[in-house]
Amino acid sequence: MLEMALTGSKRYWTWISFLLIVIGAGVLSYLHQFDYGLGVTGMSRDVSWGFYISQFTFLVGVAASAVMLVIPYYLHDYKKFGKIVILGEFLAIAAVTMCILFIFVDLGQPMRVMNVILHPTPNSILFWDATVLNGYLFINLIVGWTTLTADRKGTPPPAWVKPFIYLSVPWAVSIHTVTAFLYAGLPGRHFWLTAVMAARFLASAFAGGPAMLILLCLIVRKVSKFDPGKEAIQTLGKIVTYAMFANVFLLGLEFFTAFYSQIPGHMHAFQYLYVGIEGHDKLVPLMWISTILALISLVMLVFPNIRKNEGQLAFACVAVFISLWIDKGFGLVVGGFVPNPFERVTEYWPSLPEILIALGIWSIGFLVLTVLYKVAIAVRERTASWPELH
Amino acid sequence: MSINRRDFLRIAGASTLFGLAGVPAVEEILKTNAEAAVLPGPNALKAKRWAMVIDVNKIGTEEDYKKIIHACHSIHNVPDIGNKKDEVKWIWEEDYEHSFPGVSDEFVPESIEHKPFLLLCNHCAKPACVRVCPTKATFKRPDGIVAMDYHRCIGCRFCMAACPYGARSFNWRDPRPFIKEENKEFPTRMKGVVEKCTFCSERLARGLKPACVEASNGAIVFGDLEDPGSEVRKVLSTKYTLRRKPEVGTGPSVYYVIGGNEHA
Amino acid sequence: MYNGGKIILGLVIFVGLFAFPIFYNTGKTADVPKPSLDTPVINQMEKKECVESKEWMKANHMQLLDSWRDSVLRDGNLVYESTGGKKYIMSLQNNCMHCHSNKKQFCDSCHSYANVKPYCWTCHIAPKENEI
């Protein structure tokens, strides 16, 4: 089926070339980092994880969100998602690919990455994260490819793939839970040491992922003859609404615990992120943009009249996505390191090579996504002319 | 072609098996190598749980602090990179307030408030860094030392996020150009691995106490925490001491004598 | 056959590219390395012997070093008792290289020939050879 990605309009090839150029810049930056060491990034002794790990964390959420299509379609027989569930699965594949790459570029000794398998260490959450992420990638490859192949032939998917589909549901939850456990089990990092971390991760994932999916559906409709369906998009909009409310609620719980208890260690990271500590306030503008976008999106999403207008829904989804990207794809990781264990403040800001490498990985993700979506759309465009089967 | 398909498959299969069984095979080779054996050093210092008590009141001037830090950093080839971002350190000075955040009171004696403390890896009883390491590159030895295997570290820095004491440094770049005078008897590290204090395990194996203890003129006492007759236990039974962040449950093995300046 | 010419041309380029190392090296031979034992310490030894027999070391030094590393670092050992009952400190930098102070003529001669690149020397300090 992949050959379907080899024919396309001029616009398609322009987009592919653009991605390849950005990937090239990222690869060159990575070679520089590989040679010099991670010192080319903005990370330091005090803030020892930065942009890479936060992108990884955010994207695990995007990957997990495919389950928001799988559950209604396969467990509740919600037919409207039938045409787009493949878009969710392919988005998961692209997102997990990016996750794995972001972990890889963050390693100081990438050539030794197989040590994780050569010396398996079940007490390390990172060991489990590597396991569940790779597993999730395979499950989605198997399910996505098999169901699409069956669709193309106009036959129902083979029976053996069903167990994989059901397995993908708890597995999606597991990847984000395990990722939250990377943070939530560390003594002495107050900002991360919270039992609602995994719950908050899942809530933000189920808002951010479907928000991205709505945007992708609208793009797909615009550039192809395949229509994901107005009603499917509206249902996704409702999912985004509920999940975003849950996410903001959970964030509110964190604020309450920190500031009502007045325990200094619990307040510090929030103070750093939202007002700054002793004049150190690099992240403050970003965090407020995130907060304002979250509020705007909630207001827009909660009124059905606004949500039903696809243009306005798209705007709200962009707001949700950016808000969550700042909150989880930046603030969450950096906030955990500031102030440091001595209650001193070292700030962090990504360097140019670091941003180029991150953009390169995002572009690889979009390349994977584009190619997979191209195939899916081509199949959908063909089967759309077989009304008797659908 | 003298090799047929079946032979080829057999050889390929055998080499795959050999490849997979590579690690135990090494042990086999050593075992078959007759009576060869490995032993601890004849003078090795042994303990059930190594611990340290630091009495900064006994460290006089800034020069004395520098001497202790230099003793450690010079023999272990710790680089002096000269900027805070890439900094690597095994033992360093920190004031009372920032050494004991959450414990430090508003009003403390002048002698404590402005006296620098010496911070280093706490060689915890329940080290969080060991718990999170995905390759066992950092591990706990039977004598309580939290050790690093720099050959195995993949540089994920999970241990740095997990350590509540900021004891770990990462080699953000090649450290070699920043080592002023190499100690030819000790390795350096390479870029991309995490490093920290080792309680001088390489010296203990040869019967020597840690370098900082030796350079401290008695301000740092080192011994077995589980031996009631040890030097550290004697100090602990007579002086009031603090450990850093005991509330996180890691069980640090480095104690700090607080006050007790009356004899000085 | 569709595009037969293009396919054949592509195949020729592919085979040519991948077989290049074979063509390039045909008829050339590299000298078999002879690791040198000419160092001050070894020259002074009455009986020139390593921790194990020369043949065994030739075949197994990498496994030996690997097991020494784990034994010293992870198990806190220091001394290796050889098959012959002699005792040696297990240390690449302080003991092996004490005798074999000619890394370039000893280690590197074979390693370059076999194109193996052990990463010992990114951390362990190699002996200063021109000083001798």
Image (cartoon, coloured by chain):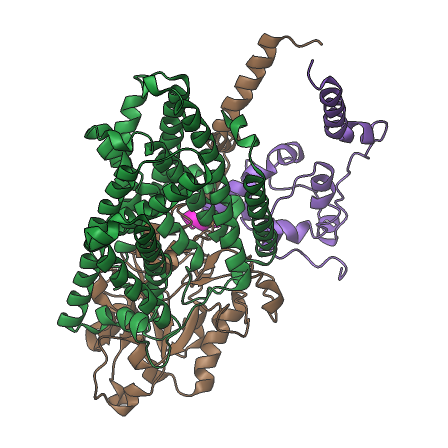
Chain colours: A green, B brown, C purple
Q: Position of residue B241 (x, y in %)?
A: 23, 75
> In the rendered structure, does residue A33 fall within the stretch colored magenta?
no
Is residue A325 visible in the rendered image? The answer is yes
- Using residue B13 as the reference point, say whether residue A231 is left or right of it: left
Q: Which quadrant of the structure image shows residue A139?
A: top left
Q: Position of residue B1 (x, y in %)?
A: 71, 9
Q: In the rendered view, tell whether residue C94 sits above or below residue A221.
A: below
Q: How many marks?
A: 0
The quarter in which the C terminus of chain A is drawn is top left
Residue in the foreground of this view, choosing between A9 and A293: A9
Task: Name, please, the residue furthest toward the bottom.
Answer: B110
| Residue found 35% across the figure and 42% down from its top | A63
Q: Position of residue B140 (x, y in %)?
A: 35, 52
Q: Tell me the magenta residue range.
A: C72-78
- Using residue C115 as the reference point, say whether residue B139 is left or right of it: left
Q: Position of residue A117 (x, y in %)?
A: 42, 37
Is residue A108 visible in the rendered image? The answer is no
Q: Which quadrant of the structure image shows residue B190?
A: bottom right
| Residue found 26% across the figure and 32% down from its top | A80
Q: In the rendered view, tell whether residue B10 sits above or below residue C31.
A: above
